[in-house]
Image: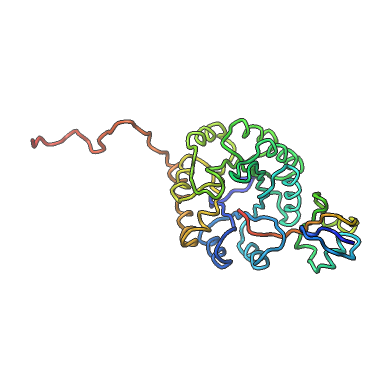
Amino acid sequence: MFYGVALQSRLMLGTAQYPSPAVLRAAIAASGTQVITVSLRREGPEGARFREIVAGSGCRILPNTAGCHSAREAVTTARMARELFGTNWIKLEVIGHADTLQPDPFALVEAARILCAEGFEVFPYTTEDLVLGERLVEAGCRVLMPWGAPIGSGQGLRNVEGLRAMRAHFPDVPLVIDAGIGTPSDAARAMEMGFDAVLLNTAVARAGNPVAMARAFARAVEAGRLGFEAGLMPRRDMARPSTPVFGMAELG
Amino acid sequence: MRIILNGHPTETGARDLAALLEERGDESDCVATALNGEFVPRAARAGTPLTPGDRVEVLRPMQGG
């Protein structure tokens, strides 16, 4: 549940960088997603067409504060987004570094506190840092979105053990892996680890065939979740025969 | 007067934010506005006077990740 909303699909999809509006529309449909992210910008090319696609997608909108480098900018952007999209949901990004796009944890908590107090339902783009996660929860966040790897890098889950620790530390907080997913197997692995959803964009938008890749991610996320729910076998250091030894013939 | 609209120096005869949108032909419901870095809600635009040098942002839904 994400702020009281149950989703059938655990894949959230970004809407940027697609080769054409038609491909974006088809990719959204093929992914089966119910949540798409959007931004607020000055009028750009294909703006009107984009808004039609968003409206026609039937998806819930998760506006972002991408590109904001201070709490003040992010808070203003969130307020503008709430009015324009008519939703309290906000994907809160406060970027610390222009090159790594790593979140600024201090400004992130500051912005989250202001927005939660104003009734926003904040999805903070964060790291796997446990203390930071706790501060965000104290600020009022009821979802956390740790990065897998830097935005747009496609490196997958760069700190698997750190993410595993985060999952264990916040058993009751919905956790979404946001950013850095490169392949369907990255997404499947995140889901097998018990994360509640994944949010990705570039891996689909920049694929050779974005629509086919959207379908691949849909299945990977579903398979990973089914695997998690089924309970993974314990990992062993040594081999153990899967075929019974009992009853084996003596042929040597 | 001259204001900075979406980063560009712009001449306008509008005296308030609502009049500026009308002058530009923006549909009021399709944009969100900020003045000098602060959000201005739709209902407050007509009561928000412009002064020379103001930085106005008029934003729309766009692609995002």
- Quarter of the figure with residue A137: top right
Q: Nearer the viewer, residue A243 or A145?
A: A145
Residue A32: x, y in percent? 53, 57
Q: Nearer the viewer, residue A6 or A171?
A: A171
Residue at 26%, 38% in the rendered image: A242
Residue A77: x, y in percent? 73, 50
- B60 versus A115 height, above or below: below
Residue A90: x, y in percent? 68, 48
Quadrant occupied by the N terminus of chain B: bottom right
- Quarter of the figure with residue A113: top right
The answer to whether residue A1 is seen in the rendering is no
- A231 versus A79 height, above or below: above
- A43 versus A223 height, above or below: below
Coloration mode? rainbow
- Quarter of the figure with residue A56: bottom right
Residue at 46%, 50% in the rendered image: A183
B15 vs A119, left or right, is right
B28 vs A46, left or right, is right
B13 vs A211, left or right, is right
Residue B31: x, y in percent? 76, 60
The number of callouts visible is: 0
